[in-house]
Amino acid sequence: MHPSPAARVDRPRREAYSLEELLDVVVRVFIERGYDATSMEDLARATGRTKSSIYHHVHGKEHLLSLALSRAVDALSAVLEEQAVGEGRPVDRLERVVRGSVQVLVAQLPYVTLLLRVRGNTEVEREALERRRSFDRRLSALVEQAIAAGEVRADLDPRVVTRLLFGLVNSLTEWYRPDGEHGPQDVEDDLVAFALDGMRPRG
Amino acid sequence: MHPSPAARVDRPRREAYSLEELLDVVVRVFIERGYDATSMEDLARATGRTKSSIYHHVHGKEHLLSLALSRAVDALSAVLEEQAVGEGRPVDRLERVVRGSVQVLVAQLPYVTLLLRVRGNTEVEREALERRRSFDRRLSALVEQAIAAGEVRADLDPRVVTRLLFGLVNSLTEWYRPDGEHGPQDVEDDLVAFALDGMRPRG
């Protein structure tokens, strides 16, 4: 409406911001309606854009899903990568993986929620699932190292413990809300205390 | 193909079994496609019946959802009901609620999975969510009793502990499979040990 030299200069930055903003809305729609049930028309309506302006950024619906899932998987993998080869006792590295994962969940809540809903119906979903499975295997190896070092109890099945630990972290997507009654640091601390030491007081 | 007096006598029993069988398939379709995206045509195709033979059992799609969700909620509520007013220390009743809930999840896995996916888009879903919330409140009260009795540590937020505890139980729907490598009793025991005493060895 007001074409000016300043507006022209800003354009590339606004376009870049645009994809980010677009993805936030798209992920919300995928979660609410389900990916399969969502059409490009739905996405155009929800984002207040024309389909062709969306196609300016991406090749289509599956490309949007791919960008969204990568964001969650990349962030989670970075946490594990850092600790898997890190210094210190295995149980301390495990604690840092849990803390880092909680932080990713809290910061990228809709993206991780979408990742956890993926069932492998498309190539993009299968790739994301494969990366999640690789994450699980490396985490499981870290749990086994901690057991071998006597830092995690040996009377529980390490694979079940890995599943439970990540079930616990992932359950945040079901109830944690950024504007809710629990602060992110309190939730992180309570979750770690619960996982490592359980509900019963230590005598 | 072989009409005989015996077949005639069996008919009422087979019809009763039929609704059960129908519901098992319907729940699987609801989980795979999502409730909103599923049509009565889809259900007819998946169950190998005509729509009118489905309407012989139920009023429609929402009725099927209602029957499926009730099955999960009724079973979970029965467990809590029994322990909320039961005998014994609060922490022991809490343990029995967790064990009972794990048993319900394992026995009714697709039904509980569907319940946990419900987002409140229809009246039936909102009712199920309200019953889940009432379950949460009663469980939270039991956690608080256990804290007051000194049987659960007091340094964690009781509402966060309740959420984590049920996040842990509900996470079974994400990975537990009846034909998988972990037996139901082992999973139940490991989950209870994890929740009560944590991963770290007790000194």
Image: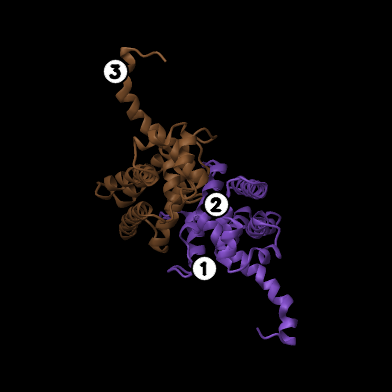
Chain colours: A purple, B brown
Q: How many marks?
A: 3
Between disc 2 and disc 1, the foreground one is: 2
Q: Secondary structure at mark 1?
A: helix
Gap in angstroms between the C-alphas marked 2 and 1: 36 Å
Residue placed at 42% from the left, 15% from the top? B1
Q: Nearer the viewer, residue B203 or A1?
A: A1
Measured along the vertical axis of the image, is residue B33 above or below residue B182?
below
Q: Nearer the viewer, residue A189 or A182?
A: A182
Residue A38 image position (x, y, % from top left) = 56, 55
The circle on residue A37 is: 2
- Tell me if residue A73 can be seen: no
Which residue is labeled 3 in the image? B9
- Tell me if residue A112 can be seen: yes
The circle on residue A185 is: 1
Badge 2 density bin: few <14, some 14–19, many ≥20, Cα 10 Å: some
**Left-right relation of B63 to A38:** left
Residue A163 image position (x, y, % from top left) = 54, 46
Residue A64 image position (x, y, % from top left) = 65, 58
